Amino acid sequence: MELLRFATSGSVDDGKSTLIGRLLYDSKQIYQDQLDSVERTSTERGDEYIDLALLTDGLRAEREQGITIDVAYRYFSTPKRKFIIADTPGHIQHTRNMVTGASTADLVLVLVDARNGVTEQTRRHASIASLLRIPYLVVCINKMDLVDYAEERFVELRDEFANFAKDLDVEEMSYIPISALEGDNVVDHSTNMDWYSGPSLLEHLEQVDVASDHNYVDVRFPVQRVVRPHANDLHDYRGYAGQVAGGVLHVGDQVTVLPSGKSSTITSLETMDGLLKEAFPPMSIVVRIADDLDISRGDLFCAGDNQPEVSQELQAVICWMAEAPLSAGQKLAIKHTTRWARALVQEVNFRRDVNTLDHDEAASELELNDIGGITIKTTEPLFVDTYARNRSTGSFILVDEVTNVTVAAGMLVRAHA
């Protein structure tokens, strides 16, 4: 059965957790003990209704504050499709968690409170989804019950968002009026909005044609670990474990190993379940080759006639996640696939205005939750593709070397030889 990964996004209290709770509840995906727990907690808090948001707001701090802090993952299925939901936080302080939750999504739900309209955080999350090259955005105008299910309000907010989003890099955008609290147009069609003739949210999620974003053309296999068992009968065994990031590997294929540039032939592809004839993204495998080459963690297997860029100077767009601002001259660690290096920020090229999507090229710093372009120089060559070509080899994280905290997520725009 086909799998769809999707993430929720939007501002604080736009109803993301309630929407997921409603999806699970109305599609009969909740166990009785889970529902009993939610009912009990809702009663203890004095709520006049069953707060379905508690199904995803698992942390005690989230339940006390009524907001989502961490990324909560939920799994469910219908006869037509399997789903993995990432319920991401709406608070601006936790934008980094939204980036994490959306980074593997095929589709993003952008919630808009029908009373408050399109906010700055709504625009920020839509902008991040665009940068992550998530092809489908579904804009759910929520809490329609609080505006008397007015078609005029839905049309007003739909047009406002569409005007903002015309410059976003999104393949398809859909708009659905819903009430997550009451269940209108979530799983079942609403009798309160007979002016809306489109699909319910679940129907749309079941029908959307999600093409894989994996690159099956360019062979890319970053080595995560060299496997050398200590058993006596395996003393000659040497394998290279990792996750296929691109292309299709076959037994008998010739591969080139970077950075050495030496070549060999694949003799076997192995998993816990046995031998394979071929492997493709995102499979985790062990590759064995015919020759005894000097290969270690961070090296990359590729095809001899189709190699990534090898560069120490990168131009990228990042989401800055640290309290202290980023400026030129700052030194950080960079993790790209399985390879680590040190990096120097040579220049801040621009800061993106999340409201207008304009680039402020006069900006010299990026502050917490800013999105902007930078140029960095690394101490070691990295084996990269642009993010548009391969999301695995075109992305990286920046890490503070003192605190070991991840301070930025980046998407490669261009590499300089």
Image: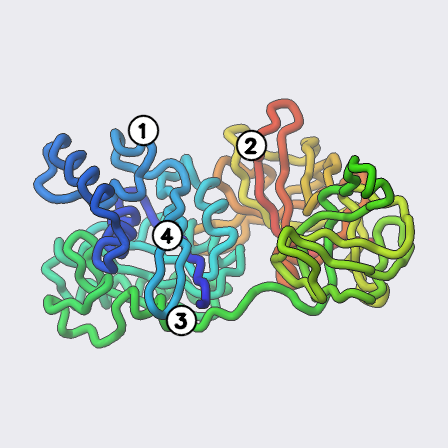
Q: Earlier in the sequence, mark 1 or mark 2?
A: 1
Residue 388 in the image: x percent, y percent? Answer: 62, 62
Q: In which quarter of the image is the N terminus?
A: bottom left
Could you tell which of marks 3 and 1 lies nearer the N-terminus? Answer: 1
- Furthest residue to the top? 402
Can I make out residue 113 in this image? no
| Amino acid type, label 1 | Ala
Which callout, 4 or 1, points at the residue further toward the start of the chain?
4
Q: Mark 1 points at which residue?
A: 61
Of label 3 and label 2, which has the lower sequence position?
3
- Mark 4 vs mark 1, CA separation in Å: 20 Å
> Judging from the image, what secondary structure is the residue with disc 3 in?
loop
Q: What residue type is labelled 4?
A: Thr
Q: Is residue 317 above or below residue 199?
A: above
Secondary structure found at label 1: helix
* Real-space Cα separation, disc 4 to disc 3, in angstroms: 16 Å
Q: Which of 53 and 323 is in front in this view?
A: 53
Closer-to-camera residue (309/199):
199
Residue located at (82% from left, 60% from top): 267
> Disc 1 versus disc 2: distance between alpha carbons?
27 Å
The answer to whether residue 191 is visible is yes
Q: In terms of secondary structure, where does tag 2 sit?
A: loop
Question: Which of the two marks, 3 or 2, is nearer to us in this view?
Answer: 3
Could you tell which of marks 4 and 3 lies nearer the N-terminus?
4
- Using residue 201 as the reference point, say whether residue 395 is left or right of it: right
Q: Residues within 10 Å of mark 2 (few under 14, many from 20)?
A: some
**Mark 3 lies on residue:** 208
As drawn, is 407 to the left or to the right of 146? right
Identity of the residue drawn at 62% across and 41% down: 397
Q: Pick the residue in front: 348 or 360.
A: 348
The residue singled out by tag 2 in the image is 325
